[in-house]
């Protein structure tokens, strides 16, 4: 039994789970704090052209400017333009202040702005229309050979707008000329509306917003082999019925409402525990082997440990079987976690070349049905396999979490003695490098100040005597470890306030030494 489960009882976080034979195979989560922008179309303005990067930075109304590489600039921008050098460059085509229509290709990630494109993709239930990219044409690789040939025969009969391309989605298989032409006309009208709206408004603005997570899930996952779509919120249920009755009426009877009076939807369908495991750093296999996921700025590292795996008849056989199980599970986890970009897998060392090739083939087979494009390398002599996976959206962890404010994403905190010594060294350097006549106030968490007052009391006294100042140490209950502040005390405050009255709240700029106050 294959189901699409939509948990929408809490509007601030909507979850969509794809379940096949009671096993979670795909998971999408959208929160009110992290709305998806991929697919949105904006009226934008070129803010800077960087010839050295062959790209432009684009103001499209967000805090961070988007990044537009030259390869994503439509050829129509170059019409009638003569290159200044041997070949056409981005400086010839785009100018600062120029207004353009862009679509978000990749979401913002960390310090990186969104990746943009001037090649517009308008997604429908059966196809994707590319109104300014006539070279874009294709048929979903998940469509079988018979249906593919039928579609190839139908495509020349469709009336497609000039300078447009067409990509047939999986759901387009088996559809007749009337259904396909209806969607072509619908998407063409949408493109005309987008161009009209752009001309009628001078300011930068969001022209077209991609469908919400419910509609996207139905459009992308509802197929012939889907037994039911189960929704636990009445308003979302009605929205789903309206969408399906409009574009896929033959699936209307598969839209079901679930009453959560006695059980939550995910718990009732036995997938809540599987959803929780997606957020775990470590995944344990039935064989006893473990898979550990670690994400960095550049790549995702996946480590495989044999742990309690002892199924093999020898070390080589045990390693091979653990790697084989892990390859299948990693392919599932990449989809569940929606991990994109460069991925490096550290397989357990195998001496046999035959076994290494078998693992590579197993990885290719396991990722064959992935919606994202996956490119797989070969296992190196160090046991590492490199692969890249198309970034469809931000990963599940990025969509639902934020960088830890205490460790700043490093995952490691200093020990109390180390942080205390950091404070002392920073204070010593500042006192020795400048003439400080004012008293100093140090604030940090209770345990750090306790360490300084007891273990480093003599050192503090020596600094006070050497520089002729008083150093006040104040434990701040509002300041979380490992944050601290070192501040010069103002003359008037020194005479009027007790030390405990100088506790700062809320904490604004931790780890900042501020001797420049007047």
Image (cartoon, helix red, strand yellow):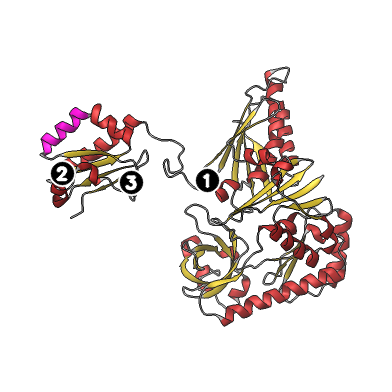
Other residues around mark 1 within 10 Å, as few (<14) / some (14–19) / many (≥20): few
- The alpha-carbon separation of the residues under discs 2 and 3 comes to 19 Å
Compared across the picture, whether 109 is left or right of 132 comes to left
Compared across the picture, whether 293 is left or right of 424 comes to right
Q: Residue at x 84, y 69 (%)?
A: 179
Picture coordinates of residue 236 (x, y %)? 70, 59
From the viewer's side, name the closer residue of 11 and 87.
11
Outermost residue, top side: 313
Label 3 element class: loop
Find disc 1 in the rendering and name its residue.
298
Identify the disc placed on residue 510. Answer: 3
* Nearest to N terminus: mark 2 or mark 1: 1
- Majority secondary structure in the magenta region: helix
Is residue 302 positioned above or below 209 on the image?
above
Find disc 2 in the rendering and name its residue.
439
Q: Residue at x 72, y 22 (%)?
A: 317
From the viewer's side, name the closer residue of 438 and 346.
438
């Amino acid at each position: 039994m294959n189901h699409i489960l939509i948990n929408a009882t809490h509007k601030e976080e909507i979850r969509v789970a794809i379940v096949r034979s009671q096993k979670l195979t795909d998971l999408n989560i959208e929160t009110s704090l992290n709305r998806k922008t991929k697919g949105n179309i904006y009226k934008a303005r070129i803010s800077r052209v960087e010839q050295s990067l062959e790209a432009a930075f684009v103001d499209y109304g967000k805090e961070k400017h988007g990044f537009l590489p030259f390869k994503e600039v439509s050829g129509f921008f170059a019409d009638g333009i003569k290159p200044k050098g041997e070949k056409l460059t981005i400086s010839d085509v785009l100018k600062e202040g120029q207004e353009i229509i862009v679509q978000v290709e990749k979401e913002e990630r960390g310090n990186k702005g969104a990746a943009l494109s001037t090649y517009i993709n308008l997604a429908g239930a059966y196809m994707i229309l590319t109104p300014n990219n006539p070279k874009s044409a294709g048929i979903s690789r998940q469509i079988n050979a018979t249906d593919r040939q039928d579609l190839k025969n139908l495509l020349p009969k469709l009336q497609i707008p000039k300078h447009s391309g067409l990509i047939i989605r999986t759901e387009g298989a088996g559809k007749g000329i009337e259904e396909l032409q209806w969607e072509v006309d619908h998407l063409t009208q949408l493109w005309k509306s987008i161009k009209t709206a752009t001309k009628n408004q001078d300011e930068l603005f969001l022209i077209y917003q991609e469908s919400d997570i419910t509609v996207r899930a139905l459009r992308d996952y509802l197929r012939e082999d889907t037994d039911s779509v189960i929704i636990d919120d009445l308003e979302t249920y009605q929205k789903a019925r309206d969408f399906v009755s409009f574009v896929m009426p033959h699936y209307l009877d598969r839209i079901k409402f679930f009453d959560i009076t006695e059980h939550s939807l995910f718990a009732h369908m036995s997938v809540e525990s599987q959803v929780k495991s997606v957020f775990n750093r470590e995944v344990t296999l039935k064989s006893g082997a473990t898979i550990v996921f670690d994400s960095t700025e550049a790549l995702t590292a996946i480590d495989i440990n044999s742990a309690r795996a002892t199924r093999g008849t020898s070390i080589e056989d045990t390693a091979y079987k653990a790697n084989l199980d892990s390859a299948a599970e990693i392919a599932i986890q990449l989809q569940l976690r929606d991990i994109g970009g460069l991925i490096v897998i550290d397989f357990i060392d195998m001496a046999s070349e035959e076994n290494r090739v078998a693992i590579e083939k197993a990885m290719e087979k396991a990722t064959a049905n992935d919606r994202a494009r996956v490119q797989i390398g070969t296992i190196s002599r160090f046991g590492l396999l490199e692969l890249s996976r198309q970034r469809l959206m931000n990963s599940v962890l990025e969509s639902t979490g934020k960088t830890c404010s205490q460790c700043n994403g490093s995952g490691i905190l200093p020990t109390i003695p180390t942080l205390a010594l950091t404070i002392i060294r920073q204070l010593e350097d500042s006192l020795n490098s400048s003439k400080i006549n004012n008293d100093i106030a140090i604030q940090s968490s209770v345990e750090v100040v306790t360490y300084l007052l007891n273990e480093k009391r003599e050192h503090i006294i020596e600094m006070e005597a050497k520089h002729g100042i008083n150093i006040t140490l104040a434990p701040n209950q509002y300041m979380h470890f490992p944050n601290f502040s070192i501040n010069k005390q103002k003359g008037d405050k020194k005479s009027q306030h007790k030390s405990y009255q100088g506790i700062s709240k809320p904490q604004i700029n931790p780890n900042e030494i501020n001797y420049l106050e007047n």
